[in-house]
Image: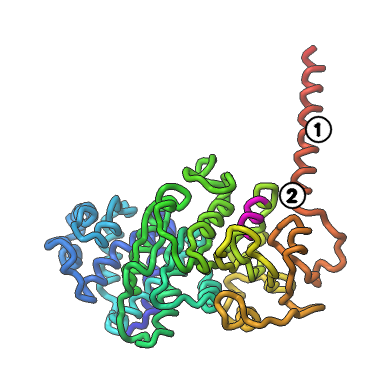
Amino acid sequence: MARAQDIVNKLWHLCNILRDSGITYPEYVTELTYLLFLKMAAETGFEKDLAIGFRWKDLSSSTSSDQFIFYNELLATLGRSKVRSVQEIFVGARSFLSQPRHLKLLVEELDSINWYEAREEEALADLYEGLLEKNSTESKAGAGQYFTPRPLIESIVEVVKPRAGETIQDPACGTAGFLIAANRFIKLHSKDGSKKGKRTKASCFSGIELVRDTHRLALMNTMLHGIDGKIICGDALGDDGASLPPVDVILTNPPFGTKRGGGLPTRAFPVATSNKQLAFLQHVYLGLKTHGRAAVVMPELLGSVARAVCTDFMDRCRLHTILRLPTGIFYAAGVKTNVLFFEKGVNPKNNTGDVWAYDLRSDMPNFGRRNPLTREHFREFEKSFGSDPAGRSKRVDQAGGGRFRRFTRDQIRERGDTLDLPWLASATASSRPNLPRADSLVAEILKRLNVATNGLAALRKDLTD
């Protein structure tokens, strides 16, 4: 009998066949989302939510040429469903398949799988989560941009400790990894135990995802994990984000870069910026309730606007812990990222005091497919963080070569309110000269480019005179 991982491997093998027709990894997973929804509805007994005549058996019993036409009609019909959860998954859905034989192959393979051992809710959820993880690791053009490494998510949730009854949000939810991990943590640590109360109250979880196809993946993932939360397809940096009520906990890994199409977010923030990370950071600390907790993945923040945002952030919130992440675990290789752990203050000024930083970057191996990042890499950080989710546990400054250090607010201010706080010298870089800061290098490059441009303009003038 097939196990969830065996099913994942079998389904993923089909992608290699379909790639010959130009179907990409993300398109394949989106296509599987449609078909798996129909098949899992048949396996788990919630087909009653689907229109009669547009269910799995109707698709699988169609002949090859009629099946392809019927499949597209089925997608359109379910996209108009009166059942909200079904409509949200299928609205605007279109098949990426171009040949009827490929659809026939997928349907036959799904029908041939022994689903007996995967019929439990958690097993089906693990199956789908496995497909999403495959998508994120098989190709740089896959789902890596919205799939945060699960060991990192689990470690963040472990120290933040979301509790039953708290409201939890991810304004850049991707495939909803943070919400699912938070839900699993709450079930595991609730008094009722993880076996009872399978579905979680809708009011507890909320999320926003900008990309329509990724939003579908998030809806499917949360549905399979028993979460009835409100996942919006919209812009957290616009009216959608502004309309969300304050919450107790925010866990997120915002997208990297400037706002799509350039320009400023369409909602007002204390510090105007087109940088997504800086805008998302402001959304998070403005969207927390007083004493609310947050953990946010941020790249290295440089420049005058970044300093203004960080100063405002540390005034309004008590930043208590920074986790310096290894390079290359997501985003482009070499991009430095940190996780910021903080609590919303009562007053709008002077909330940050001592800040503790854990260095998981210096002298760490290069992580990848051959050397995967695992939960064990975060154990010492979790131990150093302590049991208090607001970062108030007694901590020890590991002076010298230790990975956990304390910085005062004055020390951070002297560094220009930058939140990247290095102190360990990498063994591979110990013999290298001290290099200037990245923003200084960029300024120098721009200066030299300007000189070169002026020189070329003068040369052109001489040649045309």
Name the residue at 34% across, 67% down.
Answer: 203
Tell me where the magenta segment starts and ends, as one range: 308-314
Quadrant in the picture for the C terminus:
top right
According to the picture, the residue beneath numbered tag 1 turns out to be 451
Tag 1 secondary structure: helix
Residue 155 picture location, percent across and down: 55, 76
Please tell me whether residue 461 belongs to the stretch shown in magenta. no
Q: Is residue 272 visible?
A: yes
Name the residue at 60% across, 60% down.
Answer: 298
Residue 371 or 413: which is nearer the viewer? 413
Mark 2 and mark 1: Cα distance apart in space: 19 Å
Amino acid tagged 1: Val
Mark 2, mark 1: which one is toward the viewer?
2
The main secondary structure of the magenta stretch is helix
Q: Which mark is residue 439?
A: 2
Name the side, left or right, on which 451 lies relative to 252: right
